[in-house]
Image (cartoon, helix red, strand yellow):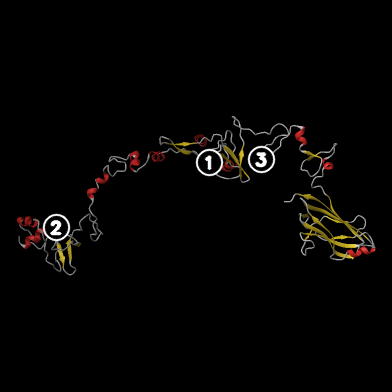
Amino acid sequence: MNLKKRILGGLVAIGLMFGVMPCFAQPANPPINNIVNYANPISNIILTPVYNVPNPIKGMLYYYLPDNLLLFYNGSAWDTLNIVGNLEGGMTYPDAGIALSTGTAWGTSVTNNSADWNTAYTDRYKWSGISTGLTASTGRTSLGGTTVGQAFFTLSNPSAVTFPRINVDNTVSTRSATQLKTDLSLENVTNESKSTMFSSPDFTGNANIAPRSTPVSTDEGDLYYDTEDDSLYLRINTSWIALNRNTGTGESMTYPGAGIAVSTGSAWSTSVTTSATMASNISDELGTGKMVFAEEEADLDTIAYILTDTLALYGAVLGVGNANDTTAFTVDNVIWSQYIDGSHDIVITEVRAVVYGTTPDIDIALLYDPNFRDGTPTTVLTADLTVTNTTTGNSTTSFSNDTITTGNWLWIRVDQADAKPKQLIVSIFGYRIEPE
């Protein structure tokens, strides 16, 4: 095939693609066999570049040399054709795989995995395990759901405050508060707040205490049933107190024997039932530690003074009223002293003093210390007692330190003597107490 036939045959093929017959400057009536020859397919089209076409015909191809463009005449204007590859070569193909276009060129192709697309829809990849639909129960199993887990997943909405319960057959059900108390064997616990329930619960039936070998906690008021000695203990004042119990069917208090109960402090002793027993606990002397009875009816305070009854503890008489007795009342002189001894301490409640002389005026202090006339003794009175009264005396009940323990010296010191008396009498009132 000569070059002319190749070109024209290719143009005919291109023209047919666009619905027109491409033309060049050919005879007005080309032979029929030439038209057929033009339509024969050819592998390459070679166009001679030109600068212009004086009389274009619709469907004509024109390779415009200055802009290196391939033009097509649509009957009224020239259209620019995109050139893929080059006029002498074939089409430029994308990379192997599924082609991606940027709109102006081929992009990077995607690996062709289309063979797996059908596999993705088989029963091995469907979450329900089948290829024709979705079965929820099969899907939950495929996802690893256990019987309990799937039961929670499909649990109906209770539309109320309820509590889940996992049953022995791995089903799940919802329970109301009343049902939950029954499930937990708490029917005898009333509906109370949490703070009340755990601090002071109100039981309507029997309260069971679980036996243990050691207590769970050591809070005050705790009950603890010791399995080792089969005893019930109550926590009181940081100690476990054993609660006595009868061996019968009911629990009750252990009472002392008939008569006047006598306790040892930790158990019941022999009760007083006879006069002989009573006599062994009676004395007619104070200070024996036993009961004291009078020979005839009398008030208790006439039989034995109560320990805290106030009475005169000490009395001090200084001078006899002579003129030269005033010399004893010199400032800083200790004019009386008493050592405190015995089994009880003393509490001073009042100090009263009276003077004798011509318009006497003296101030005295009451002091104590383990060492007689110590330089830093303890002051008993809040302030010195000024004594000027010669008939009923002067007194004070105001103290800085009113309690004096055994083993101390108590003394009177003159702190001021504007007019020395011829005589001074001091009475100290109070009571005794058990040493702390």
Q: Which numbered disc, 1 or 3, marks the residue closer to the eye?
A: 3
Task: Label 3, secondary structure: give it.
Answer: loop
Residue 351 rendering spot, x and y as whole percentages: 84, 55
Picture quadrant of residue 30: bottom left
Decide: few, some or many residues near mark 3? Use Cα within 10 Å; few <14, some 14-19, many ≥20. Answer: few
Q: What residue type is labelled 3?
A: Ser
Instruction: Give the label on residue 14, or none.
Output: 2
**Who is closer to the viewer here, 125 or 195?**
195
**Who is closer to the viewer here, 123 or 414?**
414
Count of labels in the image: 3
Residue 218 rendering spot, x and y as whole percentages: 58, 45
Picture quadrant of residue 150: top left
Decide: few, some or many residues near mark 1? Use Cα within 10 Å; few <14, some 14-19, many ≥20. Answer: few
Closer to the N terminus: mark 1 or mark 3? 1
Determine whether 177 is above or below 21 in the image: above
C-alpha distance separating marks 2 and 3: 126 Å
Question: Which quadrant, please, contains the N terminus?
Answer: bottom left
Determine whether 411 is above or below 211 in the image: below
Asked whether the beta carbons under mark 2 and mark 3 sit within 8 Å of each other, the answer is: no
Q: Going 71% across and 31% down the picture, which residue do you hit?
A: 258
Task: Label 1, secondary structure: give it.
Answer: loop
Decide: few, some or many residues near mark 2? Use Cα within 10 Å; few <14, some 14-19, many ≥20. Answer: many
The residue at the far bottom in this view is 66
Say which residue label 1 marks: 213
Say which residue label 3 marks: 266
Closer to the N terminus: mark 2 or mark 3? 2
